[in-house]
Every structure is written in structure tokens, then in C-alpha cells.
Image (cartoon, rainbow, N blue to C red):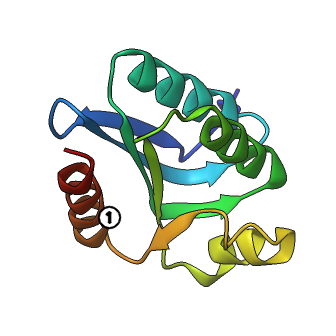
Amino acid sequence: MQASTPNFGIIQRDIDDATSVVSVEGELDLSTAPRLKWMLVDSLQAGRKHQVVDLSSATFMDSTALGVLVAVNRTLGEGSRLVIVCSRPNVLKIFELSGMEGVFTILPTLEEALEYTRGHAAQAS
């Protein structure tokens, strides 16, 4: 019997006291989106105000996963930031079709996202 989420991986790593990166590989859908949600919620509760969601290796994203990102984004307090890393046209399409591309900061590389969060952190201090 094959696992229900083949070719899916999600890794969270703390960059510093304020920043965490959650990297997603494979399909982000109804069965895998809850893992993303709890990783982000746990990281925020641990005091990491800047969340970078790296979708560079995500091959697909559905509306359930988009809903997770919207919900987490709405819970962010002042000075907190959610940044999306994505350059895949098929994944970016869901942000565009839903009208959410303007709601999120979406950058093409992890380096740019981390630089963006560092700049934001410097402005907040």
C-alpha cells in the first residue's frame, strides 16, 4: 500500500531568534496543508515573528494550502511578517487566480526573502 502523501516533504529551520523558514517539497494540498499550518503556528508560538514559506520545490498547491497561508497571515501581530518564496508559474497561478498575489510578499529566491525579513527586522528596531 502506497503512502497517501508520496513525494511530499516539509522542513522547518530557524534562521535566527526571529526568523524561521518552512520549506515544502511536492504537492501542498488537502492532505498535506495541515502539516504546514501547524509548523507555522508552532514557530510563531515559539516567538519567530518572521515566517518564510519556501515553495521553490512545491510542485502543486491547492486552495486548501492557500487558505492555510491566508489564515496564518491574518493572525500575525504587529511587526510580524509572512514571506512566500516561489517562482514556479503553476504555483504562482493560484495566488493570481484567487487575487491573493497582492496580499502576500512573494519573492523568487530564498536569499531575497531572508534579505527582506532582515530589512524589516532592522526597521522595526
Residue pictured at 63% horizontal, 52% vertical: 27
Tell whether 105 sits left or right of 20. right
Q: Position of residue 104 (x, y in %)?
A: 59, 62
State whether residue 75 is above or below residue 63.
Answer: above
| Residue 109 left/right relative to 1 | left
On the question of residue 100 being in view, the answer is: yes
Q: Amino acid at mark 1?
A: Ala
Quarter of the figure with the N terminus: top right
Q: Residue 23 at x, y = what percent?
A: 40, 48
Q: Kindly identify which residue carries mark 1.
A: 113
Screen quadrant of the C terminus? top left
Q: Which of 13 and 9 lies nearest the eye of the viewer?
A: 13
Task: Please report the residue visible at 22 percent of the width from the left and 68 percent of the height from the top.
Answer: 111
Badge 1, how many Cα within 10 Å: few under 14, some, many 20+? Answer: many
Residue 56 in the image, given as x and y percentages of width and height: 43, 66
State the image coordinates of residue 81 (x, y, percent, origin top left). Answer: 44, 48
- SS for callout 1: helix
User: What is the residue that sits farthest to the bottom in this orientation?
Assistant: 89
- Tell me if I can see residue 32 in this picture: no
Instruction: Tell me: residue 22, above or below residue 99.
Output: above
Is residue 39 shown left or right of residue 114? right
For residue 5, which quarter of the picture? top right
- Total numbered circles: 1
Q: Nearer the viewer, residue 100 or 94?
A: 100
